[in-house]
Image: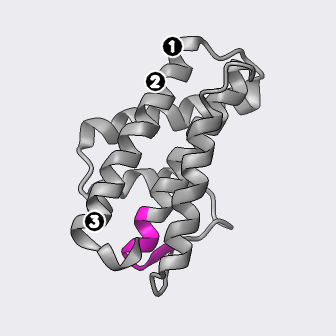
């Protein structure tokens, strides 16, 4: 389920920069709602992976469920409140449905995903400053 790793600053900075780029891309109105949702969700995943990494873990991407695990461990890795985890997990489920059904993404879902990604970014940056400042 997990590999134990040595957290390192370059990886944290790379994941943080990638999440910020994807979050910025998710706000480009020229993109379709599906692509905006997908890039916002990608930012969420990069931040969840960063949280695991900062705590010395990596999910096994070769195993199914690694997105779910990364999101559901956020209370343990960075102290995220469970109500926020529930929203992120619902976004994960919606993303899975969209990927396999081809359904259109409503603007409200895009806005929720972008807002959730922004909130997670703020939370994780604050957690890093307070708990692992050597990584940023």
Side (left or right) of 124 relative to 24: left
Q: Contact (CB < 8 A) between labels 2 and 1?
A: yes
The residue pinned by badge 3 equals 129
The residue pinned by badge 1 equals 108
In the rendered image of this protein, does residue 32 appear above or below residue 48? Answer: above
In the rendered image of this protein, does residue 135 appear above or below residue 82? Answer: below
Element on which disc 3 rests? helix
Q: Nearer the viewer, mark 3 or mark 1?
A: 3
Marks 2 and 3, how far apart at CA: 26 Å
Q: Residue at x 50, y 61 (%)?
A: 49
Q: Residue at x 40, y 71 (%)?
A: 136
Q: Nearer the viewer, mark 2 or mark 3?
A: 3
Marks 2 and 1, how far apart at CA: 6 Å
Front residue of 30 and 83: 30
Location of residue 126 by image quarter: bottom left
- Could you say where residue 58 lies in the image, as x and y percent from the top left? 51, 73
Residue stretch rendered in magenta on the structure: 51-58
Element on which disc 2 rests? helix
- Going from N to C along the chain, the mark reached first, 2 or 3, is 2
- Could you say where residue 123 lies in the image, as x and y percent from the top left? 31, 49
Side (left or right) of 66 relative to 97: left
- Could you say where residue 119 lies in the image, as x and y percent from the top left? 36, 39
**Residue 112 numbered tag:** 2
Marks 3 and 1, how far apart at CA: 32 Å
């Amino acid at each position: 389920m997990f590999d134990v790793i040595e957290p390192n600053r370059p990886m944290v900075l790379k994941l943080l920069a990638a999440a910020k780029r994807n979050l910025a891309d998710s706000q480009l109105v020229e993109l379709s709602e599906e692509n905006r949702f997908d890039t916002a969700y990608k930012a969420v995943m990069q931040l969840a992976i960063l949280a695991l990494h900062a705590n010395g873990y990596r999910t096994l991407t070769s195993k199914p469920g690694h997105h779910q695990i990364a999101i559901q461990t956020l209370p343990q890795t960075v102290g995220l409140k469970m109500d926020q985890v529930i929203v992120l997990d619902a976004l994960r489920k919606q993303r899975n449905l969209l990927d396999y059904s081809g359904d259109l993404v409503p603007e409200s879902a895009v806005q929720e995903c972008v807002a959730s990604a922004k909130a997670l970014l703020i939370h994780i940056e604050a957690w890093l400053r307070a708990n692992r400042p050597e990584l940023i």
